[in-house]
Amino acid sequence: MSTKIYVGNLPYSVTDSSLESNFAEFGNVSSAKVMMDRETGRSKGFGFVEMANAEVAQAAITALHGMSVDGRSIVVNLARPREATGGARGYSANGYGDNKRSDVGYGSGGYGGGRY
């Protein structure tokens, strides 16, 4: 089973291939991806590396965490699963705001409120 690693505080000059080559010295790299901004096409300053197993991933984390790359001290640790945020508030199929709280909105008391 592969292990996913988060790499943060990357200089904008780092590419997918240079990220992969830095981690390849510790073992087999399944994938290496620097996250890019959709609008500007520039690096967001972080990426993910997927390594063959947990042992080589831990060796890479231990060796590379805090290492200086182009004058920036990079952060390397195990990637956490993405948290479910529930999506952005705004217009949805349920209407604007998609607010499910029963204690707010029209008819719940306050100025001019109350049930009819």
Image (spheres, helix red, strand yellow):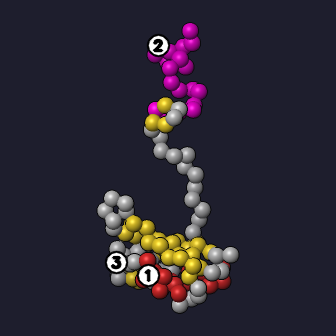
Check disc 1 and give the amino acid type. Ser
Q: Where is residue 106 in the image (x, y as percent from the top left)?
A: 50, 20
27 sits left or right of 110 in the view: right
Q: Which residue is drawn at 39% across and 66% down?
A: 36
Question: Residue 105 lies in magenta, yes or no?
Answer: yes
State the extent of the magenta-drawn residues as a range.
96-116
Front of the two marks 3 and 1 = 1
- Asked whether the residues under the numbered discs 2 and 1 touch, taking CB atoms below 8 Å apart as contact, a structural biologist would say no
Mark 2, other Cα within 10 Å: few <14 / some 14–19 / many ≥20: few
Going by the numbered disc 3, the residue's amino acid type is Ser
Residue at the far right in the pictured view: 1
Of the residues tagged 2 and 1, which is closer to the observer? Answer: 1
Residue shown at 55% from the left, 19% from the top: 108
Most foreground residue, 99 or 104:
99
Residue 87 in the image: above or below residue 41: above
Q: Which residue bears the numbered disc 2?
A: 112
CB under 8 Å between discs 3 and 1: no
Q: Marks 2 and 1, how far apart in space?
A: 62 Å
